[in-house]
Image (cartoon, rainbow, N blue to C red):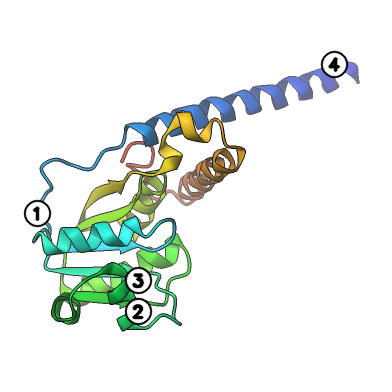
Amino acid sequence: MRIWRNLFLLAVLAGFAVLVLGFGDFAAKVHRLRAPVPVPQAQAIVALTGGSLERLRTGVRLLEAGHGQRLLITGVNPAATDGEIAAILGIDAARFECCVDLGRSASDTIGNAAETAAWANAHMFNEILLVTEDYHMARSLIELRLALPEAHIIAYPVKSRLARPDVWQRDPRLAARLGAEYLKLLAIEAREGLTGADGSGAGAP
Protein backbone atom coordinates (compact mmCIF):
# COMPACT_ATOMS: atom_id res chain seq x y z
CA MET A 1 0.00 0.00 0.00
CA ARG A 2 2.81 2.38 0.88
CA ILE A 3 4.41 1.88 -2.53
CA TRP A 4 1.17 2.73 -4.31
CA ARG A 5 0.64 5.75 -2.10
CA ASN A 6 4.17 6.95 -2.81
CA LEU A 7 3.67 6.43 -6.53
CA PHE A 8 0.43 8.39 -6.37
CA LEU A 9 2.13 11.24 -4.54
CA LEU A 10 4.96 11.26 -7.07
CA ALA A 11 2.45 11.38 -9.93
CA VAL A 12 0.62 14.28 -8.28
CA LEU A 13 3.87 16.16 -7.73
CA ALA A 14 5.00 15.51 -11.30
CA GLY A 15 1.65 16.72 -12.66
CA PHE A 16 1.86 19.84 -10.52
CA ALA A 17 5.41 20.50 -11.72
CA VAL A 18 4.32 20.17 -15.36
CA LEU A 19 1.43 22.54 -14.69
CA VAL A 20 3.71 25.13 -13.09
CA LEU A 21 6.26 24.90 -15.90
CA GLY A 22 3.50 25.19 -18.48
CA PHE A 23 2.12 28.26 -16.74
CA GLY A 24 5.58 29.82 -16.74
CA ASP A 25 5.88 29.22 -20.47
CA PHE A 26 2.41 30.67 -21.08
CA ALA A 27 3.18 33.78 -19.01
CA ALA A 28 6.48 34.27 -20.88
CA LYS A 29 4.73 34.05 -24.26
CA VAL A 30 2.11 36.56 -23.15
CA HIS A 31 4.87 38.92 -22.01
CA ARG A 32 6.58 38.67 -25.40
CA LEU A 33 3.44 39.33 -27.47
CA ARG A 34 3.54 42.56 -29.45
CA ALA A 35 1.22 44.17 -31.96
CA PRO A 36 2.52 43.76 -35.53
CA VAL A 37 4.57 46.63 -36.96
CA PRO A 38 3.71 47.90 -39.48
CA VAL A 39 0.03 47.19 -38.92
CA PRO A 40 -1.23 44.82 -41.63
CA GLN A 41 -4.11 45.81 -43.86
CA ALA A 42 -7.21 43.67 -43.39
CA GLN A 43 -10.76 43.68 -44.68
CA ALA A 44 -12.23 43.95 -41.21
CA ILE A 45 -11.43 44.48 -37.54
CA VAL A 46 -12.97 42.59 -34.63
CA ALA A 47 -12.64 43.78 -31.03
CA LEU A 48 -13.71 41.53 -28.16
CA THR A 49 -15.37 43.02 -25.11
CA GLY A 50 -14.25 42.06 -21.62
CA GLY A 51 -11.06 43.06 -19.87
CA SER A 52 -10.31 46.74 -20.40
CA LEU A 53 -11.91 49.30 -22.71
CA GLU A 54 -8.52 49.61 -24.41
CA ARG A 55 -9.49 46.61 -26.55
CA LEU A 56 -12.38 48.59 -28.05
CA ARG A 57 -10.49 51.87 -28.27
CA THR A 58 -7.71 50.08 -30.12
CA GLY A 59 -10.24 48.67 -32.57
CA VAL A 60 -11.60 52.17 -33.19
CA ARG A 61 -8.10 53.58 -33.77
CA LEU A 62 -7.35 50.83 -36.28
CA LEU A 63 -10.61 51.57 -38.09
CA GLU A 64 -9.94 55.31 -38.16
CA ALA A 65 -6.44 54.64 -39.50
CA GLY A 66 -7.94 52.67 -42.39
CA HIS A 67 -6.73 49.18 -41.45
CA GLY A 68 -10.15 47.66 -42.06
CA GLN A 69 -13.40 48.52 -43.81
CA ARG A 70 -15.63 47.77 -40.82
CA LEU A 71 -15.30 47.13 -37.10
CA LEU A 72 -17.27 44.55 -35.16
CA ILE A 73 -17.42 44.93 -31.39
CA THR A 74 -18.58 41.54 -30.17
CA GLY A 75 -20.06 40.71 -26.79
CA VAL A 76 -21.65 44.10 -26.11
CA ASN A 77 -23.97 44.29 -23.13
CA PRO A 78 -27.53 44.17 -24.54
CA ALA A 79 -28.52 46.98 -22.17
CA ALA A 80 -25.96 49.38 -23.68
CA THR A 81 -27.29 51.60 -26.47
CA ASP A 82 -25.44 52.45 -29.66
CA GLY A 83 -25.17 56.07 -28.52
CA GLU A 84 -23.65 55.09 -25.19
CA ILE A 85 -21.03 52.91 -26.87
CA ALA A 86 -20.16 55.63 -29.40
CA ALA A 87 -19.79 58.19 -26.61
CA ILE A 88 -17.60 55.93 -24.49
CA LEU A 89 -15.31 55.24 -27.44
CA GLY A 90 -15.23 58.86 -28.64
CA ILE A 91 -16.06 58.00 -32.24
CA ASP A 92 -17.98 60.45 -34.38
CA ALA A 93 -21.56 59.60 -35.23
CA ALA A 94 -21.05 59.41 -39.00
CA ARG A 95 -18.20 56.90 -38.79
CA PHE A 96 -20.03 54.91 -36.16
CA GLU A 97 -23.13 54.74 -38.33
CA CYS A 98 -21.29 53.69 -41.47
CA CYS A 99 -18.62 51.37 -40.22
CA VAL A 100 -19.20 49.98 -36.70
CA ASP A 101 -21.35 46.97 -35.88
CA LEU A 102 -22.25 45.89 -32.35
CA GLY A 103 -22.76 42.22 -31.58
CA ARG A 104 -24.88 41.59 -28.50
CA SER A 105 -25.42 37.83 -28.53
CA ALA A 106 -22.02 36.64 -27.24
CA SER A 107 -21.36 36.12 -23.54
CA ASP A 108 -18.00 34.30 -23.71
CA THR A 109 -15.09 33.65 -26.07
CA ILE A 110 -16.85 30.82 -27.89
CA GLY A 111 -19.81 33.14 -28.39
CA ASN A 112 -17.48 35.89 -29.64
CA ALA A 113 -16.13 33.49 -32.26
CA ALA A 114 -19.61 32.41 -33.38
CA GLU A 115 -20.81 36.01 -33.56
CA THR A 116 -17.73 37.03 -35.51
CA ALA A 117 -18.10 34.13 -37.95
CA ALA A 118 -21.72 35.03 -38.70
CA TRP A 119 -20.80 38.69 -39.24
CA ALA A 120 -17.75 37.91 -41.39
CA ASN A 121 -19.70 35.47 -43.56
CA ALA A 122 -22.51 37.99 -44.01
CA HIS A 123 -20.04 40.60 -45.23
CA MET A 124 -17.79 38.08 -47.06
CA PHE A 125 -14.75 39.09 -45.03
CA ASN A 126 -11.87 36.61 -44.95
CA GLU A 127 -9.08 38.83 -43.57
CA ILE A 128 -9.61 39.93 -39.99
CA LEU A 129 -7.56 41.89 -37.48
CA LEU A 130 -8.41 40.37 -34.10
CA VAL A 131 -8.10 42.78 -31.18
CA THR A 132 -8.06 41.55 -27.59
CA GLU A 133 -5.70 41.71 -24.66
CA ASP A 134 -2.43 39.80 -24.83
CA TYR A 135 -3.30 37.23 -22.15
CA HIS A 136 -6.60 36.45 -23.93
CA MET A 137 -5.19 36.20 -27.46
CA ALA A 138 -4.18 32.52 -27.63
CA ARG A 139 -7.61 31.29 -26.59
CA SER A 140 -9.39 33.78 -28.84
CA LEU A 141 -7.34 32.75 -31.86
CA ILE A 142 -8.14 29.07 -31.38
CA GLU A 143 -11.87 29.70 -31.15
CA LEU A 144 -11.97 32.13 -34.08
CA ARG A 145 -9.86 29.92 -36.34
CA LEU A 146 -12.21 27.02 -35.58
CA ALA A 147 -15.25 29.18 -36.36
CA LEU A 148 -13.67 30.66 -39.53
CA PRO A 149 -11.24 28.02 -40.81
CA GLU A 150 -10.87 29.60 -44.26
CA ALA A 151 -10.18 33.12 -42.98
CA HIS A 152 -6.81 34.75 -42.35
CA ILE A 153 -6.86 35.92 -38.74
CA ILE A 154 -4.20 38.45 -37.72
CA ALA A 155 -3.53 38.86 -34.01
CA TYR A 156 -3.39 42.41 -32.71
CA PRO A 157 -2.74 42.04 -28.97
CA VAL A 158 -3.37 44.91 -26.58
CA LYS A 159 -0.82 45.12 -23.78
CA SER A 160 -2.20 44.45 -20.31
CA ARG A 161 -0.96 44.54 -16.72
CA LEU A 162 -1.25 40.75 -16.62
CA ALA A 163 1.57 40.52 -19.17
CA ARG A 164 4.06 42.16 -16.81
CA PRO A 165 5.82 39.72 -14.47
CA ASP A 166 6.81 42.55 -12.15
CA VAL A 167 3.10 43.28 -11.67
CA TRP A 168 1.34 39.92 -11.47
CA GLN A 169 4.08 38.29 -9.39
CA ARG A 170 3.41 40.85 -6.64
CA ASP A 171 -0.38 40.77 -6.87
CA PRO A 172 -2.06 37.43 -6.05
CA ARG A 173 -5.34 38.54 -7.65
CA LEU A 174 -3.67 39.27 -10.99
CA ALA A 175 -1.65 36.05 -10.76
CA ALA A 176 -4.91 34.16 -10.19
CA ARG A 177 -6.49 35.82 -13.26
CA LEU A 178 -3.52 34.88 -15.41
CA GLY A 179 -3.57 31.37 -14.01
CA ALA A 180 -7.30 31.06 -14.74
CA GLU A 181 -6.68 32.09 -18.35
CA TYR A 182 -3.96 29.46 -18.63
CA LEU A 183 -6.31 26.77 -17.30
CA LYS A 184 -9.01 27.84 -19.78
CA LEU A 185 -6.47 27.54 -22.58
CA LEU A 186 -5.50 24.06 -21.38
CA ALA A 187 -9.16 23.07 -21.33
CA ILE A 188 -9.62 24.20 -24.94
CA GLU A 189 -6.48 22.37 -26.06
CA ALA A 190 -7.71 19.23 -24.28
CA ARG A 191 -11.13 19.61 -25.90
CA GLU A 192 -9.62 19.95 -29.37
CA GLY A 193 -7.24 17.08 -28.71
CA LEU A 194 -10.16 14.84 -27.84
CA THR A 195 -12.24 15.90 -30.83
CA GLY A 196 -9.32 15.81 -33.24
CA ALA A 197 -9.80 19.44 -34.29
CA ASP A 198 -6.86 21.55 -35.36
CA GLY A 199 -5.65 23.70 -32.47
CA SER A 200 -2.66 25.20 -34.24
CA GLY A 201 -1.48 28.54 -32.99
CA ALA A 202 -2.60 27.96 -29.38
CA GLY A 203 0.70 28.42 -27.69
CA ALA A 204 2.25 31.10 -29.88
CA PRO A 205 -0.24 33.33 -31.67
Task: Tell me where residue 78 sits by quadrant.
Answer: bottom left
102 and 8: which one is in front?
A: 102
The residue wearing badge 3 is: 115
Q: Position of residue 82 (x, y in %)?
A: 31, 82
Q: Badge 1: how crowded within 10 Å, few (<14), some, or many (20+)?
A: some
Q: Is residue 45 left or right of residue 114?
A: left
Label 3 SS: helix
89 and 47: which one is in front?
A: 89
Q: Position of residue 157 (x, y in %)?
A: 29, 47
Q: Amino acid at mark 4?
A: Ile
* Quadrant of the frame with the N terminus: top right
The residue wearing badge 4 is: 3
Residue drawn at (43%, 41%), measured in percent from left and top?
161
Q: Which mark is residue 41?
A: 1
Q: CA distance from mark 3 to mark 4?
A: 53 Å
Q: CA distance from mark 1 to mark 4?
A: 61 Å
Discs 4, 2 touching: Cβ within 8 Å: no
Label 4 SS: helix
Q: Earlier in the sequence, mark 3 or mark 2?
A: 2
Q: Earlier in the sequence, mark 1 or mark 2?
A: 1
Q: Amino acid at mark 3?
A: Glu
Q: Is residue 183 left or right of residue 12?
A: left
